[in-house]
Amino acid sequence: DRDAFARIEAAPVSLEAHVLAQIDTGFFGDDRRIALAFAEALEPSGWLGETVAEVAARCRVEEAEAAAVLEHLQRFDPPGLFARDLAECLTLQARDRDLLTWEMQTILGHLDLLAAGRFAELARLCDAEEADMRAALAVIRSFQPKPGESFASDRPPIQPPDLRVIRGPLGWEVELNRSQLPRLRVSAAGVADPAAQVWLARAESAARWLQRAVERRQSTLLRTAGCLIAHQTAFLEQGARQLLPLSMEEVAAELSLHPSTISRATAARLIETPRGLIPLRAFFSRSVTAEGPAAPQSQDALIALVGEIVAAEDRRKPLSDDAIVKRAREAGAVLARRTVTKYRETLGIPSSYERRQPERV
């Protein structure tokens, strides 16, 4: 049905898809494995969410080897991706435009002065005029502080699920949502015409090839979902606090597939669960350092823990981030204060000052 295909709109490219396409052509062997680990740590802003040391430890390689891969990744399009902070993000973009002069490096190293409008101090540091500093500010304002935000969100829109998970007689079972599966049909109109018969034979051959490709993709999706559910049964039954650390690399190794195959198979896929409609990628979670026998070991579980601690606080005396650190330690999870702040902001929870409710008289 040619008209049906014409009505299909191309899906906007996500940041992850854009990055993976560049990794596919730019890395091989161990470097590719490390690059995929960095891609997994990429935040929606386009900044890197883990340190080089953390990625190196996760990949079991030397930090210098991981740093070399990161240097290559930082030349990806758009400029500024994989930066570890604002200064580095802007520096990468200045380098891409051949604007990374000594003066520009000095300015980017003193963004606090620039933000405060202290142009005279910057001018002295750069041995230049204040007018030059204002001109540099105009250039910097043309940069994108969060280059990842120009891409479509990986969060899928409201749509029917691609998969369902149900409790069967032998435990949790995953099935495809058949109503969402594509159907192929080749019209047999005009088969009496010899030329049409030749075309029809070719079309049928192409349709069979496409059908096999679709079936392989469905099989990969079903196997991947089954593996995720097998690992995350406690999450289904008890909630986000029980989400275990699980990476795409681990699932790929278990299924004898490439991590990029797992990434493509799970992109924008939804699964219907007893806990509601969930993006399939929610079953992945990065491992973070925590201590104690009952400590959650995945980032998402720790984020959920922070949310639970705040939800249980006295609204008249909200907990500071330091107090949340202590409560988390009591629950068996050792977190740094900056980590608690990051998780709180991820949940959209304001500071303790903003959460404070006045006492009623």
Image (tube, rainbow, N blue to C red):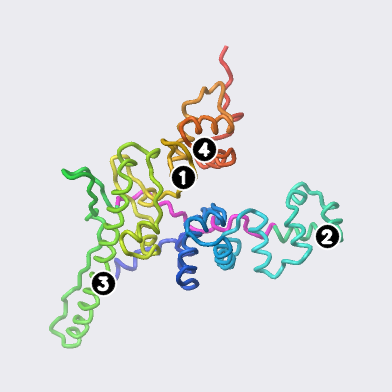
Which residue was labeled with disc 3? 210
Cα separation, mark 3 vs mark 4, equals 51 Å
Question: What is the crowding at mark 3: few (fewer than 14 residues within 10 Å), some, or many (at least 20)?
Answer: few
Badge 2 vs badge 1, beta-carbon distance below 8 Å? no
Name the residue rendered at 58%, 66% in the picture. 68
Whole-percent x, y for residue 330 in the image? 49, 30
Name the secondary structure under disc 3.
helix
Region rendered in magenta: 141-161
Residue placed farthest to the left in the image? 192
Mark 4 or mark 2: which is in front?
4
Question: What is the crowding at mark 2: few (fewer than 14 residues within 10 Å), some, or many (at least 20)?
Answer: some
- Identify whether 271 is placed above or below 22: above
Which residue was labeled with disc 1? 299
Residue 308: in magenta span: no
Residue type, mark 2 in image: Cys
- Identify whether 295 is placed above or below 27: above
Q: Earlier in the sequence, mark 4 or mark 2?
A: 2
Q: Which mark is residue 126?
A: 2
**192 or 119: which is nearer to us?**
119
**222 or 213: which is nearer to us?**
222
Q: Is residue 139 left or right of residue 298?
A: right
Question: What is the crowding at mark 1: few (fewer than 14 residues within 10 Å), some, or many (at least 20)?
Answer: many
Q: Which mark is residue 334?
A: 4
Mark 1 or mark 3: which is in front?
1
Mark 4 or mark 1: which is in front?
4
Q: Earlier in the sequence, mark 2 or mark 3?
A: 2
Whole-percent x, y for residue 32 in the image? 47, 67
Residue 142: in magenta span: yes
Residue placed farthest to the bottom in the image? 194
Mark 2 or mark 3: which is in front?
2
Residue type, mark 3 in image: Leu
Which quarter of the picture shows residue 53?
Answer: bottom right
